Image (tube, rainbow, N blue to C red):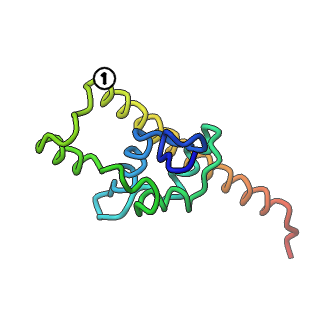
Protein backbone atom coordinates (compact mmCIF):
# COMPACT_ATOMS: atom_id res chain seq x y z
CA UNK A 1 0.00 0.00 0.00
CA UNK A 2 1.21 3.48 -0.82
CA UNK A 3 1.81 5.74 2.12
CA UNK A 4 2.76 3.05 4.61
CA UNK A 5 5.93 4.20 6.30
CA UNK A 6 8.46 2.32 8.38
CA UNK A 7 7.41 -0.93 9.96
CA UNK A 8 3.93 -0.69 8.38
CA UNK A 9 5.49 -1.01 4.93
CA UNK A 10 5.60 -4.65 3.87
CA UNK A 11 9.04 -4.14 2.28
CA UNK A 12 10.54 -2.70 5.43
CA UNK A 13 13.69 -4.40 6.69
CA UNK A 14 14.11 -2.44 9.93
CA UNK A 15 12.12 -1.69 13.05
CA UNK A 16 12.09 1.65 14.86
CA UNK A 17 14.36 0.17 17.54
CA UNK A 18 16.90 -0.88 14.92
CA UNK A 19 16.84 2.61 13.38
CA UNK A 20 17.60 4.11 16.79
CA UNK A 21 20.38 1.56 17.31
CA UNK A 22 21.92 2.39 13.91
CA UNK A 23 21.89 6.12 14.67
CA UNK A 24 23.31 5.52 18.16
CA UNK A 25 26.17 3.45 16.74
CA UNK A 26 26.85 6.08 14.07
CA UNK A 27 27.20 8.79 16.75
CA UNK A 28 29.63 6.78 18.87
CA UNK A 29 33.11 8.34 18.94
CA UNK A 30 36.43 7.27 20.46
CA UNK A 31 38.69 9.35 22.69
CA UNK A 32 40.04 11.20 19.65
CA UNK A 33 36.62 12.31 18.50
CA UNK A 34 36.64 9.85 15.57
CA UNK A 35 33.59 7.81 14.70
CA UNK A 36 33.93 4.23 15.89
CA UNK A 37 31.56 2.64 13.35
CA UNK A 38 31.19 3.54 9.69
CA UNK A 39 28.02 2.92 7.73
CA UNK A 40 29.85 -0.06 6.18
CA UNK A 41 30.67 -1.51 9.60
CA UNK A 42 27.04 -1.26 10.66
CA UNK A 43 25.78 -2.72 7.35
CA UNK A 44 28.12 -5.73 7.68
CA UNK A 45 26.66 -6.53 11.07
CA UNK A 46 23.12 -6.52 9.76
CA UNK A 47 24.30 -8.62 6.81
CA UNK A 48 25.64 -11.13 9.35
CA UNK A 49 22.03 -11.52 10.50
CA UNK A 50 21.02 -12.27 6.93
CA UNK A 51 19.62 -8.83 6.04
CA UNK A 52 20.54 -7.62 2.56
CA UNK A 53 21.39 -4.00 3.39
CA UNK A 54 24.11 -1.85 1.90
CA UNK A 55 26.36 0.74 3.46
CA UNK A 56 24.46 3.35 1.41
CA UNK A 57 21.15 2.25 2.99
CA UNK A 58 22.68 2.69 6.45
CA UNK A 59 24.16 6.07 5.45
CA UNK A 60 20.71 7.25 4.30
CA UNK A 61 19.25 6.25 7.66
CA UNK A 62 22.03 8.10 9.50
CA UNK A 63 21.55 11.22 7.32
CA UNK A 64 17.77 10.90 7.85
CA UNK A 65 17.08 10.68 4.10
CA UNK A 66 15.02 7.64 5.05
CA UNK A 67 13.24 7.05 8.36
CA UNK A 68 13.56 10.80 8.99
CA UNK A 69 10.29 10.99 10.93
CA UNK A 70 11.74 8.79 13.70
CA UNK A 71 13.22 11.17 16.30
CA UNK A 72 16.60 10.35 17.79
CA UNK A 73 16.56 9.36 21.45
CA UNK A 74 17.59 12.81 22.69
CA UNK A 75 14.85 14.36 20.54
CA UNK A 76 12.43 11.73 21.81
CA UNK A 77 13.33 12.60 25.41
CA UNK A 78 12.51 16.25 24.65
CA UNK A 79 9.17 15.21 23.13
CA UNK A 80 8.38 13.07 26.19
CA UNK A 81 9.07 16.04 28.46
CA UNK A 82 6.58 18.08 26.47
CA UNK A 83 4.15 15.10 26.61
CA UNK A 84 4.00 14.73 22.83
CA UNK A 85 4.87 11.01 22.92
CA UNK A 86 4.90 8.30 25.57
CA UNK A 87 8.29 7.21 26.99
CA UNK A 88 9.74 3.80 26.16
CA UNK A 89 8.99 1.13 28.72
CA UNK A 90 11.94 -0.16 30.78
CA UNK A 91 11.53 -3.56 29.10
CA UNK A 92 11.76 -2.02 25.63
CA UNK A 93 14.84 0.00 26.63
CA UNK A 94 16.49 -3.21 27.89
CA UNK A 95 15.67 -4.98 24.61
CA UNK A 96 17.15 -2.10 22.61
CA UNK A 97 20.30 -2.02 24.75
CA UNK A 98 20.71 -5.81 24.46
CA UNK A 99 20.23 -5.63 20.70
CA UNK A 100 22.78 -2.82 20.40
CA UNK A 101 25.27 -4.71 22.58
CA UNK A 102 24.92 -7.78 20.34
CA UNK A 103 25.43 -5.71 17.18
CA UNK A 104 28.51 -4.06 18.72
CA UNK A 105 29.88 -7.49 19.64
CA UNK A 106 29.32 -8.70 16.07
CA UNK A 107 31.06 -5.60 14.68
CA UNK A 108 34.11 -6.34 16.81
CA UNK A 109 34.08 -10.02 15.84
CA UNK A 110 33.75 -9.04 12.17
CA UNK A 111 36.68 -6.63 12.39
CA UNK A 112 38.81 -9.30 14.08
CA UNK A 113 37.82 -11.90 11.47
CA UNK A 114 38.58 -9.45 8.63
CA UNK A 115 42.02 -8.75 10.13
CA UNK A 116 42.77 -12.45 10.54
CA UNK A 117 41.65 -13.24 6.99
CA UNK A 118 43.73 -10.37 5.65
CA UNK A 119 46.77 -11.58 7.56
CA UNK A 120 46.22 -15.13 6.28
CA UNK A 121 46.01 -13.86 2.68
CA UNK A 122 49.14 -11.80 3.21
CA UNK A 123 51.06 -14.75 4.64
CA UNK A 124 49.86 -17.15 1.95
CA UNK A 125 50.65 -14.60 -0.74
CA UNK A 126 54.17 -14.23 0.63
CA UNK A 127 54.74 -18.00 0.65
CA UNK A 128 53.65 -18.39 -2.96
CA UNK A 129 56.12 -15.86 -4.30
CA UNK A 130 59.46 -17.00 -5.53
CA UNK A 131 62.51 -15.41 -4.06
CA UNK A 132 64.88 -13.68 -6.55
Quarter of the figure that contains the C terminus: bottom right
Q: Which residue is at 60% across, 56% downward?
A: 54
Q: Which residue is at 65% across, 47% downward?
A: 52
Q: Nearer the viewer, residue 129 or 108?
A: 108
Q: Which residue is at 11% across, 44% downward?
A: 82
Percent across and percent down for residue 48 are: 61, 41
Q: Residue furthest bottom?
A: 132
Percent across and percent down for residue 79 are: 18, 46
Q: Residue furthest left?
A: 82
Residue 56 higher or lower than 116, as above or below: below
Percent across and percent down for residue 73 are: 27, 46
The image quadrant that residue 83 belongs to is top left
Q: Which residue is at 50% across, 39% downward?
A: 8
Residue 69 higher or lower than 97, as above or below: below
Secondary structure of residue under mark 1: helix
Q: Nearer the viewer, residue 68 or 1?
A: 1
Q: Nearer the viewer, residue 104 or 55?
A: 55
Q: How many residues crowd around disc 1 within 10 Å: few (fewer than 14), some, or many (20 or more)? A: few
Residue placed under numbered mark 1 in the picture: 91
Q: On the picture, is 13 further left or further right than 118?
A: left
Q: Residue furthest top?
A: 91
Q: Nearer the viewer, residue 19 or 48?
A: 19
Percent across and percent down for residue 128 are: 86, 61
The image shows a total of numbered marks equal to 1
Quarter of the figure that contains the N terminus: top right
Q: On the picture, is 11 further left or further right than 17?
A: right
Amino acid sequence: MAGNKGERNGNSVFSKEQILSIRRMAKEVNGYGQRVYSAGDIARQYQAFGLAVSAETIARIIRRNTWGWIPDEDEEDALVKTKMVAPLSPEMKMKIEASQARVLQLVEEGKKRDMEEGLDRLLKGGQERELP
